[in-house]
Image (tube, grey):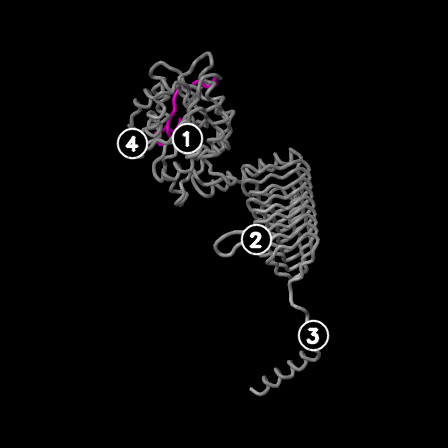
Amino acid sequence: MTTPIAVIILAAGKGTRMKSDLHKVLHPIAGRPMLLHLIDSLNRAGATRRVVVVGASGEQVEAAVAATGVEIAWQREQLGTAHAALQAKASLADFDGVAIVCFGDTPLLATDTVARLAARLEAPDAPTVAVLGFRPADARAYGRIVASADGTIAKMVEFKDASAEERAVDLCNSGVTAVRTRDLWRLLEAVGNDNAAGEYYLPDVVTLAIAEGGRAVAIETGEDEVAGINSRGELAAVEAGWQAARRLAAMADGATLIAPETVWFSHDTVVGRDVTIAPNVVFGPGVAIADGAVIHAFSHIEGATIGAGAEVGPYARLRPGAALGEGAKVGNFVEVKKASVGAGAKVNHLSYIGDADVGAKANIGAGTITCNYDGFFKYRTTIGAGAFVGSNSALVAPVAIGAGAIVAAGSVVTQDVPADALALVRPAQVAKPGWAARFRQQMAARKAGK
C-alpha cells in the first residue's frame, strides 16, 4: 500500500476502574507501557504520523511519548469518541491519506490487522469507511455491526441504543476505524449527540457516510486482539496471554523452558538457541542471552547480557549493566550490578559484585563484597584475569587486584594488589590455652551469685 497512514490514538478517558494515579494506557505489559506496545505495532504497519488524544492526566502520557515523535492533542471536555478524534484535526491538517482511529487501551492490535484495515479502503469498491469487527464469546455491552455476508455495513449501533433484534447480532465493533482524512473531518464534524448518552459517537461516521451515498465495510479479527484493558484484572489477563505467547515463541526458537508457565519475559528479552531456563525466572527489560546459557531457578535478571554457555543462579540477581562472558558462572544468592564478569570467571556463592570488572577465569570466593559506595559516590573495583579472591573478603573501591593475585580469605583490601602477589589483610591468630574454660567458670559463678 502506498497511501500514507496516520493514526489517531484515543487516550482521553480517566480510566477510573484502574483505581490508579498512573494513566491507564501507561500501565505496563511485559515491562512496557501498553500505549508503547500499540505505537510500535502501528509504526510497523507503516504509520508515518501518530497523534495521541489525551485528557485527564494527559501530562503523564505526553511525557511517556516525548522521545517517540508522537504528537499530542487535548480533549479538554469528555464529549465522546467522535469529539475526541476530531481534536487531532489540527495536528493532521496537512496530512492526506488514511487515518486509523484506535484506542490506547488495546495494546495487542496487530500490525497486519492495521495494514489490512487501511488497505481495505484501497480496494476496487473504494469504501468510505472500514471498521474492525470481532465476534466475542460474550457480546455484553459492545456496540453492534449489522452487516451482510460480504462485510457491507447496513447499520452500526451502540448497545444502549440497540433494539433487542440488534443486540442479538454477534458481530461487535472494536472501535478501530479507517477513513481517508479528506472524508474524516467532514464526517466527524457532522456527528450529533442525539442518543441515550448524549455523546458524540465515533461509529456515527458510518451512518453519515452511508447517508451520503458512500459505503462502509467491516473486516474481522479475533476477540483477544482487540481486548480493551479497563481494570487491573483485565490487565493481568492480557499480561498472561502475552506471556503465554512469548513462552511458546521462545521454545519454538530453540530454548528449553522447564516449567514454561513460571517464566516471565520482558517485551524485549532476547533468548538464543539451546538456552535452558529453569522454573521461576523473571526477566526485566534489556536482557540478551546467548546460545547455550543456563538460567537456574528463582533468578531475577534485568538490563544484563549473558554470554554463550554462561550459567546464572539459582537465586541470582543480575541488575542493569551486568555482563557475563562466555562460560562465566554467577551462582546462588549472588548479585551483580554494572559489572563485567569475564569468560570462564566464577562468582559462585553469596557475593555482591557491583561497579566492577572481573577478569577471565578469576575466582571470587563466597561472601566477597565489592564495597563500591561511600555514601556519596560510587567507585570501581578491577580484578585481573586468573585472580583468586578468598571467601568473606571485602574489596574497598577504588581498588585493583592484579592478574593472578591471591587475596586471602577474610581480607579487607584497601590498596591495590600487584599481579601474582598474595594479599593477607587480617591480624595474626592468637590462641590462649584454658581461657575459654576459665571464662565459663567465672560467668557461671556470677550468674549463681545473683
Query: Of residues 366 and 223, which is closer to you in this image?
Result: 366
Callout 3 crowding tier (Cα within 10 Å): few <14, some 14–19, many ≥20: few
Cα distance, mark 3 to mark 1?
A: 73 Å
**Element type where label 3 sits in the image:** loop
Whether the residues at callouts 2 and 4 have beta carbons within 8 Å, the answer is: no
Whichever of callouts 3 and 1 sits on the residue coming sooner in the sequence is 1
In x, y percent, where is residue 260? Answer: 62, 41
> Could you tell whether 354 is left or right of 149 in the image?
right
> Which quarter of the rendered picture does the C terminus lie within?
bottom right
Cα distance, mark 2 to mark 4?
A: 68 Å
Whichever of callouts 1 and 2 sits on the residue coming sooner in the sequence is 1
Callout 2 crowding tier (Cα within 10 Å): few <14, some 14–19, many ≥20: some
Q: Amino acid at mark 1?
A: Val
What number is the disc on residue 431? Answer: 3
Q: Which residue is mark 4?
A: 198
Cα distance, mark 2 to mark 3?
A: 35 Å
Whichever of callouts 4 and 1 sits on the residue coming sooner in the sequence is 1
The nearer-to-camera label among 3 and 1 is: 3
Q: How many marks?
A: 4
- Magenta region, residue range: 149-168
Is 335 colored magenta in this rendering? Answer: no
In x, y percent, where is residue 76? Answer: 30, 34
